[in-house]
Image: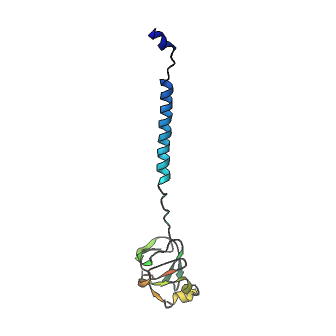
Amino acid sequence: MWVESMKDEKAISEIIGAILLVAIVIAGIGIVAVFMTSTPPPKANQKAVLSSSCIDCSGDSFVIVVRHDGGETIDPRTLKYFLRTEFANGTPFEHIQVYGTKFYQAEEFAPYSREDICSLPPSSIAYDDATSMKNGDVVVIYYKMKET
């Protein structure tokens, strides 16, 4: 009799197993979702955008102008400049580190012409005293070619 009653009962262990499996998967997805949304996204690092140009003043002396074109404010004293020169045929002449000569704020540098830049106009801020380079500010590097 007891054997017959077991044959008539429907097995629910498969259904309970499936429900438990689905519950575990949903709980796992929930835990991962909470973990992913509770931490703030990493901060994007701002970068300074610098551009440079070279002005030929006399054939053997040059002025390199490094302009801050946007982005993060930087300390110009922490920048390192390397100059690579080459002969007209493209062979390297020298690769050296050069140093900032003058620092100009944007509004001070704007009116200068090429001739003004080549003739060393006075600067209101010595390069070594400049601590903040922002959009439009300029570092000027004067360079004289070595005798060959």
Q: How many marks?
A: 0
Give the residue displayed 42% in from the left and 78% down from the top.
Answer: 77
Q: Nearer the viewer, residue 84 or 122?
A: 122
Give the residue displayed 48% in from the left and 53% down from the top.
Answer: 38
Residue farthest toward the front in the current orientation of the protein? 1
Q: Indicate the colouring scheme.
A: rainbow
Is 21 situated above or below 38? above
Is 3 situated above or below 105? above
Across and down, in percent, residue 138 comes to: 51, 80
- The quarter in which the C terminus is drawn is bottom left
Residue farthest toward the top in the current orientation of the protein? 1
Give the residue displayed 47% in from the left and 45% down from the top.
Answer: 31
Q: Nearer the viewer, residue 33 or 67?
A: 33
Is 111 situated above or below 32? below
Across and down, in percent, residue 30 comes to: 49, 44
Across and down, in percent, residue 112 comes to: 57, 87
Left or right: residue 96 versus residue 54 is: left
Across and down, in percent, residue 13 comes to: 47, 24
Give the residue displayed 50% in from the left and 62% down from the top.
Answer: 44
